[in-house]
Image: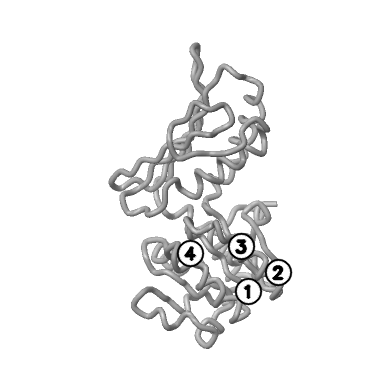
């Protein structure tokens, strides 16, 4: 298969502004539902190759000796193991894309390690293109509503029963976007709140829900609401693959907004 044919095949999953240049060897750290979804897309829609699949049964493979087989690592595991996994990617000197949430109290420490070691690291609470667009709409809406004191703000997130962290990383990211746009909002809390400076996040766990996020502004006279609902894990998986392709050859700490310009 020629380079042109490879690139044409890969375009199936990429938006028009991101085209992969070549195939890449991927280490999947975490082989749960997200890891399998990523592998399925790589096998069916790209010319990339999964060279390493790591889960709790073969966790000893998370070491430079094995990780160096890959051009890039994609990490979707659990909060208690994410930091170690990323640090091992740093030790192996391979770029790492991480979608694990629930551990980000240590994110700044890990970013500093990445910079000091001249490595490449991209973390996002959600890799969906749709969620990225939803975040930009959330930011704009928050700016427009900043002086509308008669409205109460609520962020609601609904996920499957197996999701360990609450609120979701995406809900926290949305709350931070709101705080950037509205100076009167200075913190978030994972329960209903009547304080003007707090963003109330309500979390629900239901069976077979891939992920729903709702931003609601309510007054006595009307309600303004925007919603993002994920129908499958495919959008998250495609975004993670795009991020992995994009980060190869780079050094530094990145966010999803860097990928989308």
Please say if the residues under marks 1 and 2 sit with CB atoms less than 8 Å apart: no
CA gap, disc 1 and disc 2: 33 Å
CA gap, disc 4 and disc 1: 15 Å
CA gap, disc 3 and disc 1: 27 Å
> Which of the two marks, 4 or 1, is nearer to us in this view?
4
Residue 89 or 185: which is nearer the viewer? 185
What percent of the width, then of the height, locates residue 244? 58, 66
Estimate how packed mark 1 is, as few (under 14), some (14 to 19) or many (20 or more) residues with alpha carbons within 10 Å: few
Please say if the residues under marks 4 and 3 sit with CB atoms less than 8 Å apart: no
> Which of the two marks, 1 or 2, is nearer to us in this view?
2
Q: Earlier in the sequence, mark 2 or mark 4?
A: 4
Instruction: Describe the element under mark 2 as helix, strand or loop.
Output: helix
CA gap, disc 2 and disc 4: 33 Å
Residue beneath the point at 49% across and 30% down: 154
What percent of the width, then of the height, locates residue 29? 46, 72
**Residue carrying label 4:** 45
Q: Earlier in the sequence, mark 3 or mark 1?
A: 1
Q: Residue at the front extreme? A: 195
**Residue carrying label 1:** 3
> Which of the two marks, 2 or 4, is nearer to us in this view?
2
**What numbered label is drawn on residue 173?**
none
**Residue carrying label 2:** 115
Classify the position of the N terminus by image quarter: bottom right
Q: Earlier in the sequence, mark 2 or mark 3?
A: 2
> Which of the two marks, 3 or 1, is nearer to us in this view?
3
Residue beneath the point at 56% across and 76% down: 89
Please say if the residues under marks 2 and 3 sit with CB atoms less than 8 Å apart: no
Q: Residue at the bottom extreme? A: 65
**Residue carrying label 3:** 122
- Whether residue 245 is situated above or below residue 12 in the rendered picture: below
């Amino acid at each position: 298969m020629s380079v042109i044919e490879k690139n044409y095949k890969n375009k199936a999953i990429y938006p028009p502004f991101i085209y992969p240049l070549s195939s890449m060897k991927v280490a999947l750290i975490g082989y749960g539902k997200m890891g399998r979804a990523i592998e399925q897309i790589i096998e069916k829609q790209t010319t990339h190759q999964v060279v390493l699949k790591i889960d709790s049964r073969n966790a000893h493979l998370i070491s430079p000796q094995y990780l160096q087989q890959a051009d890039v690592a994609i990490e979707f595991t659990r909060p208690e193991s994410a930091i170690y996994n990323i640090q091992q990617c740093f030790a192996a000197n391979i770029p790492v894309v991480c979608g694990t949430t629930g551990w980000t109290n240590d994110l700044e420490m890990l970013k500093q390690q990445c910079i000091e070691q001249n490595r490449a690291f991209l973390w996002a609470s959600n890799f969906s293109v749709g969620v990225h667009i939803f975040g930009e709409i959330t930011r704009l809406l928050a700016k427009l509503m900043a002086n509308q004191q008669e409205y109460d703000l609520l962020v609601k997130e609904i996920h499957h029963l197996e999701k360990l962290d609450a609120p979701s990383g995406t809900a926290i990211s949305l709350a931070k976007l709101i705080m950037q746009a509205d100076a009167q909002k200075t913190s978030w809390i994972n329960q209903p709140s009547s304080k003007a400076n707090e963003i109330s996040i309500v979390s629900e766990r239901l069976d077979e829900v891939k992920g729903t996020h709702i931003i609601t502004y309510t007054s006595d006279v009307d309600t303004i609401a925007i919603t993002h609902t994920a129908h499958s894990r495919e959008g998250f998986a495609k975004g993670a693959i795009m991020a992995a392709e994009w980060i190869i050859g780079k050094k530094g700490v990145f966010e999803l907004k860097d990928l989308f310009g």
